[in-house]
Image (cartoon, helix red, strand yellow):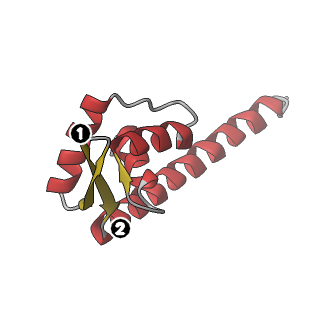
Amino acid sequence: MTSAVFYVLTALTDEPRHGYGIVQETEALSEGQVQLRIGTLYGVLDRLAADGLIALDREEAHQGRLRRYYRLTGGGETALAAEARRMASGARIAARRIEARRTEARTPPAC
């Protein structure tokens, strides 16, 4: 799962959002690390919808334009939870190895 997909799914966990709202929430959640362009976003949304991870929640007219709101599906929540567990496991492994390396660096060589 790419960072963009991870943060798009995460942005939809609390409420349905329209495209621009997803872009803003994704940027905020990622602390600016993921900055989606609208064109890129709709490609991601189309793929996620085709995979059943998100669904169209509703459409609303806003200033003469149609806004589509998307929501996370049960399958999307399951996929996001699995990815969060995978990432957390990877972070724990990396942290243990970093700590082991630091411990080795502090240990004086045997005489």
**Is disc 1 surrounded by few (<14), some (14 to 19) or many (20+) residues within 10 Å?**
few
Q: Position of residue 31 (x, y in %)?
A: 58, 35
The residue drawn where x is 46% and y is 41% is 26
Image position, residue 104 (x, y; %):
74, 35
Q: Are dots 1 and 2 in contact, CB under 8 Å?
A: no
- From where the camera sits, is residue 46 visible? yes
Q: Which mark is residue 52?
A: none
Question: Left or right of 50: which side holds 79?
Answer: right
The residue at which mark 1 appears reads as 42
- Name which residue lies at 37% across and 31% down: 36
| 58 over 111 or under it: above or below | below
Direction front: furthest residue: 64
Work out which residue is located at the far bottom of the displayed protein and give it: 74
Q: Which residue is pictured at 50% across the width and 36% down the height?
A: 27
Q: Which residue lies most toward the left here?
A: 50
Which of the 4 image quarters holds residue 79? Answer: bottom left
In front here: 40 or 58? 58
Please indicate whether residue 70 sits to the left or right of residue 96 in the image: left
Looking at the rendered structure, the secondary structure element under dot 1 is helix
What is the three-letter code of the residue carrying label 2? Thr
Say which mark, if any, is on residue 78: 2
